[in-house]
Image (cartoon, rainbow, N blue to C red):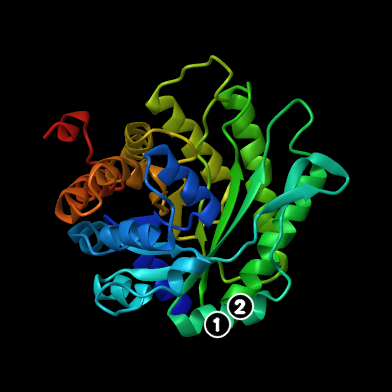
Amino acid sequence: MSEIENIAKQMVAKGKGILAADESTGTMTKRLDSVSVKSTSENRLKFRETLFSAQGMKDYIGGVILYDETIKQKTSSGKTIPELIKSFGSIPGIKVDTGAKVLAGSPEEKITEGLDGLRDRLNKYYALGARFAKWRAVYIITDKYPSQVSITTNAHALARYSALVQESGMVPIVEPEVLMDGNHSADICFKKTSEVIKKCYEELNLFKIDLKGTILKPNMILPGTNSGQKISSKEIAELTLKCLKESVPSEVFGIAFLSGGQTEIEATKNLNEINKINDTNFVFTYSYGRALQQSALKYWSKNIEDIAGTQKIFNHRAEMCSLASKGEWSETLEKA
């Protein structure tokens, strides 16, 4: 097994998932504003250090996705953030795209940028301790979209990124997110997500990417937020599993879902249902941001010095996600 394949396996080891703590300064400011905490570099570090030094990191988190600001910061004890993460048995990673920009020729859609100078940036991040990277492509669903232009160009960018990441000795997380926004049905989400993922693997194969040394970070198959359609967790699980069985090559080992606007409970329940019916060799786990952090952030905002209390909330949420990654979660455990 190559080193990158080994890293990919560690990231999604049994009962572990990925903590997405790669919010840009702008996004993190919105999150802190929502709980009335001033967004300073110190406060952003304080919250993240609180999570990264929790017991839940050791037990339930295989990897942490960082943002450029965070990977360069030092903790209150003088360790770098990657050193802290590694000391808790987790693997530090880094978001490397520079954001989704307007797609020329299809201005309602987005193309993710960040390939220019990426090789040099990856080498610097590797030296800072990162061992995996993340790149997110976003797709909207309407009557006309996602267009072939969006599907093709974003898949090509994900493949070029993946080639550079593996060249630098790191694992690429491939994140093609078909957004929940819209009035589309779950069946349309299934069709469009399948199309997007299949095209990504066409491009990854063209670039001869070692698929065992990658992690896929897809959306679950859900109806659009404005569709009015309500489907059960069991139906979400069946559609999601069918989509991934048909679209993802068997060499891919780890699939870590994004939460994509689901509540903490929804993201946990849906992951649990997927694992209850998982009849594949894929490891289905979590790569959650808000669905791992939101309750802890709300609690922390009331007293940012209460580290133990905040960590207790985070530990519980991470444990619930861990159980869901093994199909062992139940709603009664939320109240325990």
What amino acid is labelled 2 in the image? Arg
Frontmost residue, 133 versus 192: 133
Which residue is rendered at x = 47% and y = 39% of the image? Answer: 241
Q: Are marks 2 and 1 in contact (CB under 8 Å)?
A: yes
Residue 34 location, x and y as percent?
A: 42, 38
For residue 245, above or below residue 120: above
| Position of residue 165 in the picture relative to residue 265 (left or right) | right
Residue 155 shown left or right of residue 22 in the figure? right
Please indicate whether residue 38 sits to the left or right of residue 160 in the image.
left
Q: CA distance from mark 2 to mark 1?
A: 5 Å
Residue 66's label in the rendered image is none
Q: Using the rendered view, name the quadrant where residue 210 is placed.
A: bottom right
> Label 2 crowding class (10 Å Cα cut-off): few <14, some 14-19, many 20+?
some
Instruction: Give the quarter of the figure containing the C terminus.
Output: top left
Query: Which residue is under mark 1?
Result: 124
Compare residues 275 and 159 and report the one nearer the observer.
159
Q: Is residue 151 left or right of residue 237?
A: right
Q: Mark 1: give few (<14), some (14-19) or many (20+) Cα within 10 Å.
A: few
Please report the residue visible at 19 percent of the width from the left and 34 percent of the height from the top.
334
Where residue 157 sits, quadrant-wise, is bottom right
Query: Dot 1: what SS?
Result: helix
Is residue 176 shown above or below 298? below
Q: Nearer the viewer, residue 34 or 122?
A: 34
Residue at the right extreme of this rendering: 105
From the image, tell me which residue sits under label 2.
121
Q: What's the residue type where badge 1 is placed?
A: Lys
Identity of the residue furthest to the left in this view: 336
